[in-house]
Amino acid sequence: MTNFDCIVVGGGHAGCEAALVASRMGLNTLFLTLNLDTIGQMSCNPSMGGLGKSQLIFEVDALGGEIGYATDQTGIGFRMLNTKKGPAVWSLRTQVDRKKYREFMQNILRNQKNLILKQAEVAEIIVKNNKAKGICTRTGMEYFGSAIILTTGTFLNGLIHIGLKHYPSGRMGELPSKDLSDSLKKLGFKLGRLKTGTSPRVDKNTIDFSKLIPQEPDKEPAHFSYRTHQKSEIRSQRLAGGFNPPKVPCYITHTNRKTQEIILKNLDRSPLFSPKGIIKGIGPRYCPSIEDKYVKFKEKSSHQVFIEPDGLDTNECYLNGLATSLPEDVQISLLHTIPGLEKVEIIRPGYGIEYDFAYPNQVYPTLETKLVKNLYFAGQLLGTSGYEEAAAQGMVAGINACLPRSDKRSGTETARQASLKVKKKSPFILSRQEAYIGVLIDDLVTKPIREPYRMFTSRVEHRLILRQDNACERLMKYGAKFGIVNKKDYNKVNEMMANVNLKLKELKTRRVTPNEINSILKAHHSAPITYPVSLFQILKRPEINYSMIEPLAGSLNPEIENKIEIQAKYDGYIKREYQLVKRMKKLEDYKIPDAFNYSTIKGLSREAREKLSQTRPLTLGQANRIPGVRSSDLTCLIVALKNHV
């Protein structure tokens, strides 16, 4: 078979989600990758989630993705971060068994209906009349599809650096893809170079753990997927009624002045700092190599290192915080200066990798390219870093590739087209006001990329209402609409929220007298009341939690109790956020025609005219966020749009 509805290229986290969502929405899908054995590979550290990233996993899960459930199944140490702060920035993070995660994801893909997996190197995108029609492999085999999704990760023109030695590779031990990069350039896409890196992997049996600080996982861990607590077959270790994954600790150590001396002494052997300037690509500012840290922060001799287990059945550990492209002998020397690692043996050296990426202002918020219709980009190809960011983009690209389009498909109507006839034909675009995914993609297509993009909570203006705990309430409606979330699961979420709202109403109307509540307040060092107030007002106090007023309010299931507390504690702030969202929605709802001619607008600055013509914003809201577009430019644009027929 050589004709498909959708072709997904690349077996990383973006590719996995794109292939699964396309096939689950009814498309006959072809999944092509350089190596079938490395589908779902965690190329960098063996962990998922963390600050700003866990929210993406929860959102992908709510839409019907797989990354959250796969992480729950293969996680070996779950820990909630930022618990001393408000729930808006609570972020779940877990160590993952690298091998088991890969095997779990491969098993899901192999058994997915409508999905065919093949091993091949894609060399060319077949394009006719500015529409992607298929792909051609390096061996000359052609496959045709109505939508093509590229998720090539670091494989486009990949070049690995260890010291002053470098060689073509998309990942350690795997070949890069050069022909596909050339094909994209021929089509007119502007490509740049980025750089990332990994840390050495070391032998656990050669670590002196007595010198390290253990970081224990949570005793009662949270999980990522709404599906996890519904499955009885999760693990053999599962406790009745609870989530009980393995609890393997990480360990912390620190570099020191001796480490610093070795690194600074050998900078001439670093591809980053050698006078030869071997590495040209721009690296991630928020995840720099250890040599980069010492060059930029020479006054700081100590940097934290996390020793992360690679899995339950391996002696391999990842040294998070020690990404490096220094020569292997230097890596050995610097590791031996670190407490606990004095006799450590390296299993795999750290390395830097340069790769081609496509500037993301060349795609729409749907992730369809502007130059070629039916062609989608996702993941590191668009300049992002991180498994979570990639999975989120793969999800969005996959959904949009499935939506009915104006152009006709060859042959008879597909199952996907038939199933979606009753649904709107508008593209699937999440706004900044409704999801972290919306912020991620809006940033990519609107703002210039100068380094690998990484998601942070600080990038999200409305993070108080875009929490990881309410992802299902916000986004599961889309997963249900597209048929990738079970309707029963969606109904359960709606039922739970109905119970939450009913309980909130009850707490707001149930007034308690001083005689009823003051003894409870006194026991918890909270000021007594002098007149009747609602239980909701009592629960708003920082020092009072629901369990304290349970004798008066009634018992609740823990999940509902948590949602009630958040609503009470942040009631005023949440109302304010929704008011801001409502005001911003006017700009977001104001559509700009795709072919709008900005050169005819009087009063528009030259910079704004260039930026608007290049970005082609879909709404006034997006136009307002383009760097270089001033408020006066926006006013001119609004006037022009009102006069536009």
Image (tube, grey):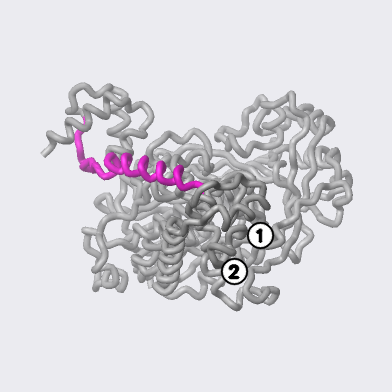
Which residue corresponds to the image point at 32% horizontal and 28% vertical from the top-left? 629
Looking at the rendering, in which quadrant would you find the N terminus?
bottom left
Going 12% across and 34% down the picture, which residue do you hit?
643
Q: Is residue 410 visible?
A: yes
Left or right of residue 203, residue 584 in this image: left
Mark 1: which amino acid? Answer: Val
Cα gap from disc 2 to disc 1, whole angstroms: 12 Å
Residue 341 x, y percent position in the rendering: 84, 45
Residue 34 position (above or below residue 431): below
Percent position (x, y) of residue 138? 47, 57
Q: Main secondary structure of the magenta part?
A: helix
- Image height check: is 75 above or below 357? below
Q: Nearer the viewer, residue 69 or 503?
A: 503
Residue 338, compared with residue 374, is above or below; it is above
Label for residue 426? none
570 vs 442, left or right, is right
The range drawn in magenta is 569-598
Front in this rendered view, residue 231 or 308 = 231
Callout 2 secondary element: helix
Q: Is residue 302 above or below residue 589?
A: above
Callout 2 amino acid: Phe
Q: Is residue 347 or residue 378 the one in the foreground?
A: 378
Residue 43 seen from this side:
no
Q: Which residue is mark 2?
A: 104
Which residue corresponds to mark 1? 96
Q: How busy is the neighbourhood of tag 2: few (under 14 within 10 Å), some, or many (20 plus)? A: some
Q: Residue 577 at x, y = what percent?
A: 41, 43
> Per the image, is 219 magenta?
no
- Using the rendered view, name the quadrant where residue 642 is placed: top left
